[in-house]
Amino acid sequence: MQAIGEFFPLGSGAGTFLDVLRRFHPLTMPGVTINRAHNDYLEWLLEFGLIAAVLVAVWLLFYLRQWGRVWQSGEWTRFRFVQAGAGTALLLMMLHTLVDYNLRVPANALFTAFLAGVFFHQPRRAAARRIRRPAAPGEKSGRAPPVFAIPPENQNNPFRTWSPTAVSRRRTGV
């Protein structure tokens, strides 16, 4: 916390945690190296200062706003349940980040990004998905499209009687 206060609001710079911490490390613990803060939020505050604080606050605002969208009234589809699960998993990842540097592990960061993609996805409405074609001249807009007949030359299926024995008979002439 002392290092954060000394380098705030600009921060110490990306990747400087280990070098900065040596200056504030107690002399009573020689030979001990602390390579991470075991709290990503504090490490980000030290390295990036006020910018990190603003980004974390904006992330939390977006996260809370998306929960409002997920919990809106209406039908609970399968995807909405998946979004609620992804939001819960994101909350757990954010809580885990308070006590460990789990987002520094590439697999955890990738999984967190996947969860965020699912949670923040805005599904299209069913009415917007329907493609509306313009009505042809003389056609009512509410009618179903016309059904076309299959031309006679395409009505015979050459594969209708296919079987391995029929193919071998044709080849051998039997």
Image (tube, helix red, strand yellow):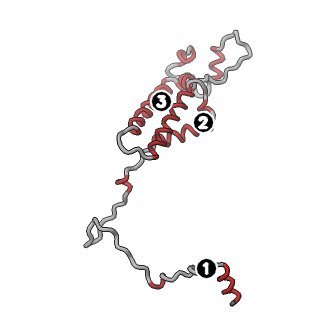
The part of the image, by quadrant, that contains residue 109 is top right
Q: Which residue is mark 1?
A: 162
With respect to residue 155, does 66 lie above or below? Answer: above
Which of marks 2 and 1 precedes in the sequence? 2
Which callout, 3 or 2, points to the residue nearer the camera? 2
Q: Which residue is mark 3?
A: 55
User: Which residue occupies 44% across, 82% down?
Assistant: 151
Q: Position of residue 145 (x, y in %)?
A: 34, 70
Kindly give the residue lying farthest to the top in the view shown: 28
Question: Which amino acid is tagged 2?
Answer: Asn
For residue 88, side relative to residue 21 (left or right): left
Q: Are marks 3 and 2 in contact (CB under 8 Å)?
A: no
Element class at badge 2: helix
Front residue of 74 and 47: 74
For residue 44, side relative to residue 150 (left or right): right
Which of marks 2 and 3 precedes in the sequence? 3
Question: Which amino acid is tagged 3?
Answer: Leu
- Quadrant placement of the N terminus: top right
Kindly give the residue lying farthest to the right in the view shown: 31
Crowdedness of circle 2 by 10 Å Cα count: few (<14), some, many (20+)? some
Element class at badge 3: helix
